[in-house]
Amino acid sequence: MKKIPVIIDCDPGHDDMMALVLAYGSNKLDIRAVTTVAGNNTIENTTRNALNVLNYIGAKDVPVAKGFQDPIVRTHKAVMERMAAARRETMTEEQRKEQSKITGALAHGVTGLDGFSFPENNPKQIEPIRAVEMMAKVLRESQEKVTIIPTGPLTNVGLLIRAFPDLLPKIERISLMGGTSEFVLTRPFMEFNTLVDPEATKIVFESGVPITMYGYDVTYRVLCGVDTIDRMEALGNQTGKMAAALLRFFMERHNKNLKQLHLKDVTPIHDACAVAGVIDPSLVTESRMLHVDIETSGQYFDGATICDYAGCLGLPANVEVVYNMDTPRFLDMLVESAGNCL
Ligand code: RIB
Ligand code: CA
C-alpha cells in the first residue's frame, strides 16, 4: 500500500518522541521532512532532541529543518512568563524552581527530553534551510498532496500559510495536536501548543485547509499505562528501551505535577494521537465538525481554542474536533511501531 506523504512539525518533548517513533515505525507514512519549533523547550534543544530521536530509531535519511525560537508576533520568553504567572499560585516552591529553568521543564525536564541519555556525536545534522522553507520545498516538489502533522506550537505552519498561499492546495490536511474543547487542564480552553503562538494558531485555523484537531478532549482519554510501557521495554530493541525510559519519566512528571487530574501511573501521549489518526482514521471513534476560533486579545488567555460545541455562533464548521479514539488499538500500534525501529 502506498505510503502517505507527511511533514511532522514538532517540539520534542516526550510525546513528540513517541509521535516520531509511531510515524517512522508504522511503515505507513512517507516522512518527507521533520521540522522543529520552540515550545516544550528552546529551539536548540527541541532540534537536538529531534535529531537524536530520529538517528536513534533508524530514521537517518529523514531531513530535519530547524524553526525559530520565537512565535510570529510575541516572544517565547514572554509567553512562558505569562503562562508560569497564571499557574504560580498553585505551584510548590520546587515546581517554581523547575519551571524557572525553562518552561516545559515541569513536564519534559530541562533538556526537553529528560529521562534518557542519547549517544554523543550524533552524525545526523539539520538541513541548510529553515523549517518553513523546507515545508514549502516539500510541498512544491511533491507529486501528491502532503499531510502536515504539527505536534508543537504552530509558528512554522502559520508562517508557511502566510508566506506561500499558492502552496495551500498541496496540503491534504493538517492533523494537529493542540487545543481543547471541553476538557479543562489548568484553565478553560487552554492547551500549551495553541497558547505559545496565538497568532499562528489563528492563521492556521482560518486558512481553509482541512484540519483535524487532537486536543486534550481525546489525549487525556487515550491514556498509556505501565503495562504498555512494559510491553515496549520487553521488545528488547534500543527504540523500545528508549521509549519506555522516556515514557516512565513523562508519567512520573504527570503523577507529580498534575495531581488535580487524579491520574495515577498513566500518561497521555498527546502528539502520537495526531499521527495515529493519519495512519488509520478508523481509530477515531468520536469527532465533531465545529466552528473553532482562536482568542488573540483575551482577558484570560490568548491562544485559547473557542470551540462552538453548542453551535450557538451560527458560523460554519472549520475543524474536525476529535473526542475519542480506540485506545487498545492505538496502544498496540505504538508498541508495534517501536518494534519496527532499531
Ligand atoms: O499540551 C500538550 C502539547 O504541548 C504536546 O504537544 C506536548 O509535547 C507539548 O508540546
Ligand atoms: Ca509537542
Image: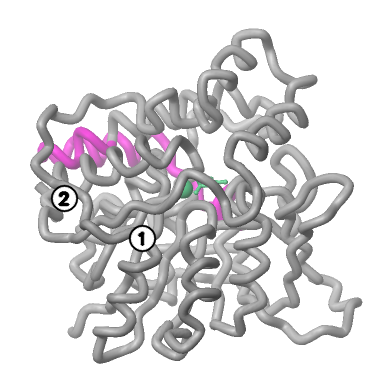
Query: What percent of the width, then of the height, locates residue 116?
Result: 26, 26
For this view, does 268 lie left or right of residue 46? right
Which residue sits at x=75%, y=77%?
Answer: 291
* Badge 2 density bin: few <14, some 14–19, many ≥20, Cα 10 Å: many
- Figure quadrant of residue 288: bottom right
- Figure quadrant of residue 313: bottom right
Q: Which residues are magenta?
A: 218-243
Q: Is residue 206 magenta?
A: no
Which residue sits at x=26%, y=85%?
Answer: 142
Label 1 secondary element: helix
Mark 2 or mark 1: whose residue is earlier in sequence: 1
For this view, does 271 lie left or right of residue 21? right
**Mark 1 residue type:** Ala
**Mark 2 residue type:** Gly
Q: Which mark is residue 131?
A: 1
Query: What percent of the width, then of the height, locates residue 159?
Result: 51, 67
Query: What percent of the width, then of the height, locates residue 231?
Result: 25, 40
Q: Quadrant of the N terminus?
A: bottom left
Which residue sits at x=38%, y=43%?
Answer: 12
